[in-house]
Image (spheres, rainbow, N blue to C red):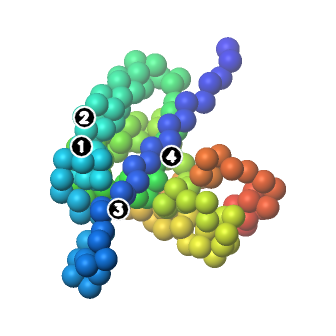
Amino acid sequence: MASVCFYFQVHQPLRVKKYKVFDIGEDDKYFNDNSDSSLNNKWIMERVARKSYLPTNQLLLELLDKYPEFKISFSLSGIFLEQIEKDFPEVLKSFQRLVDTGRAEILSETYYHSLSFLYSREEFKNQVNLHKKKVKKLFGVTPKVFRNTELIYNNELAYEIEKM
């Protein structure tokens, strides 16, 4: 039978609110747009959680229970993990339940879903290590497989990852 690898990339960026020149020195909360706009990070995450993350994770858990050979992988950016840890514990728990089955793997990646490898090896290593610590804290596992942002790959990257 052919093997299929299901890999889900999950990232939710932080959107910067509208910031005026007069806000400099008065407001250092760049991501706290509380309007009903597309800049309200918490509002967007709540909508996506209810429509996508929670129902999909429930379905995946049912599939894992029903089919013992079924396995999945997730690439969860650090910035996504920060948001669900802070404001959406039910979403975090849904991912933790999947990982607890032993058949849902968390992949390593850059913390901010960035292209840091192309610009700074030091920043790249820092982000990968920061991500590894966050995954260990939230899931009790250490990622063993690396996935780069946008699946960018070259031999230099492979060499760096192997050294890490």
Lower sequence index among marks 4 and 2: 2
Q: Amino acid at mark 2?
A: Arg
130 vs 151, left or right, is: left
Lower sequence index among marks 1 and 4: 1
Return the mark for residue 50.
2
Q: Are marks 2 and 1 in contact (CB under 8 Å)?
A: yes
Q: Amino acid at mark 3?
A: Val
Q: Picture coordinates of residue 20 (x, y %)?
A: 29, 71
Secondary element at tag 3: loop
Mark closer to the observer (1, 4): 1
**Residue that label 4 marks:** 75
Q: Are marks 1 and 4 in contact (CB under 8 Å)?
A: no
Q: CA distance from mark 2 to mark 1?
A: 6 Å
Q: Amino acid at mark 1?
A: Glu
* Closer to us: 119 or 75: 119
Residue at 25% across, 77% down: 23
Crowding at mark 1 (Cα within 10 Å: few <14, some 14-19, many 20+): some
**Residue that label 3 marks:** 16
